[in-house]
């Protein structure tokens, strides 16, 4: 029996749904490819991926001393805040950047090998999750040094991470399609990331806004970072952060899936 990539007897919605489901079931493939990407990047390196950890450690130490002094903050409370926030933001920024280039960089593979499109997204997401795991080690070290113990609230970081991954997956898929069609978008996204870094409480605490702290409600990336950062610091995230993260995920996936169902077949032709 001849196997056809997209048979004409099914709707675009059904084919897009099957693509996502098949991609999830092929976890041995994309997990191994993602790990291979990490190994290839640091081949013949003594420290390997732990260069990422060292780089993050230097950044946390330097920025912690500089901004802690500028904002007159207690380093005992500021450095753990900065360590987990900076590691999580680095993951978010990598997701935004690599989401733009996921399909473009894999043009030969997409055109020559029949693999669900979602596999390429999951591969990049898994690769960045591994890097995030290396970076978050710095927070563990800082927490031990300053005696930060999250307690039972720390378990809330797991659903927080799951919520972050739910949002990261649709963002990467949507940006991948848009940037494959419009090649001018990646530089724009890069500029937006720089702006978001300064308006998101990563290096500064929301308390510094004073009466204008309500502005953080409008920043979805603040909530996605907060549902991980607050539990690791021994605090329970506010309900507004969970609600904003879930709303962001549901609305984002509904819109992205509609776009994926309509334009999935065109991705290979846009490359």
Image (cartoon, rainbow, N blue to C red):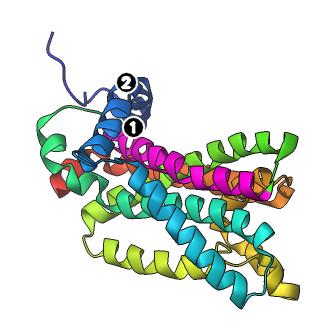
Circles 1, 2 touching at the beta carbon (< 8 Å): no
Q: Callout 2 environment at 10 Å: few (<14), some (14 to 19), or many (20+)?
A: few
In front: 195, or 84? Answer: 84
Provide the secondary structure element on which disc 1 rests: helix
> Which disc number belongs to residue 16?
1
Position in image of residue 70 (x %, y %) = 70, 90
In this image, 217 relative to 132: left or right? right
Q: Quadrant of residue 3?
A: top left
Q: Which residue is pictured at 66% across the width and 58% down the height?
A: 224
> Which disc number belongs to residue 128?
none
Q: Which residue is pictured at 70% across the width and 68% down the height?
A: 79
Q: Which residue is pictured at 61% across the width and 50% down the height?
A: 164
Does 12 appear above or below 259? above
Does residue 39 show up magenta in the picture? no
The span shown in magenta is 117-146
Position in image of residue 174 (x %, y %) = 42, 56
Q: Callout 1 environment at 10 Å: few (<14), some (14 to 19), or many (20+)?
A: many
Q: Is residue 173 visible?
A: no
Q: Which residue is mark 2?
A: 28
Does 70 appear above or below 117? below
Q: Quadrant of residue 213?
A: bottom right
C-alpha gap between disc 1 and disc 2: 21 Å
Position in image of residue 42 (x %, y %) = 28, 48
In this image, 122 relative to 141: left or right? left
Does 180 appear above or below 129? below
Which residue in the rendered view is the most extreme toward the top? Answer: 1
Q: Which residue is pictured at 26% across the width and 60% down the height?
A: 180
């Amino acid at each position: 029996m001849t196997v056809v990539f997209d048979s004409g007897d099914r709707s675009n919605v059904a084919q897009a749904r099957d693509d996502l489901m098949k991609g999830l079931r092929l976890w041995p493939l994309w997990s191994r490819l993602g790990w291979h990407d990490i190994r290839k990047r640091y081949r013949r390196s003594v420290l390997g991926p732990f260069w990422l950890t060292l780089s993050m450690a230097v950044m946390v130490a330097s920025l912690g001393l500089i901004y802690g002094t500028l904002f007159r903050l207690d380093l005992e409370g500021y450095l753990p805040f900065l360590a987990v926030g900076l590691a999580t933001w680095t993951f978010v920024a990598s997701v935004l950047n690599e989401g733009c280039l996921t399909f473009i960089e894999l043009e030969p593979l997409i055109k020559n090998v029949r693999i669900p499109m979602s596999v390429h997204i999951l591969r990049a997401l898994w690769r960045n999750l591994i890097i995030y795991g290396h970076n978050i080690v710095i927070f563990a070290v800082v927490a031990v040094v300053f005696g930060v113990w999250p307690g039972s609230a720390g378990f809330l970081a797991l659903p927080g991470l799951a919520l972050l991954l739910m949002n990261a997956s649709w963002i990467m898929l949507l940006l991948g399609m848009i940037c494959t069609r419009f090649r001018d978008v990646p530089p724009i996204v890069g500029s937006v990331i720089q702006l978001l870094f300064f308006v998101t409480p990563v290096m500064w605490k929301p308390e510094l806004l004073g009466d204008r702290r309500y502005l953080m409600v409008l920043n979805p990336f603040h909530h996605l970072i907060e549902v991980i950062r607050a539990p690791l610091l021994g605090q329970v995230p506010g309900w507004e952060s969970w609600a904003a993260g879930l709303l962001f995920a549901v609305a984002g996936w509904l819109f992205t899936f509609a776009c994926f169902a309509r334009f999935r077949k065109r991705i290979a032709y846009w490359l």
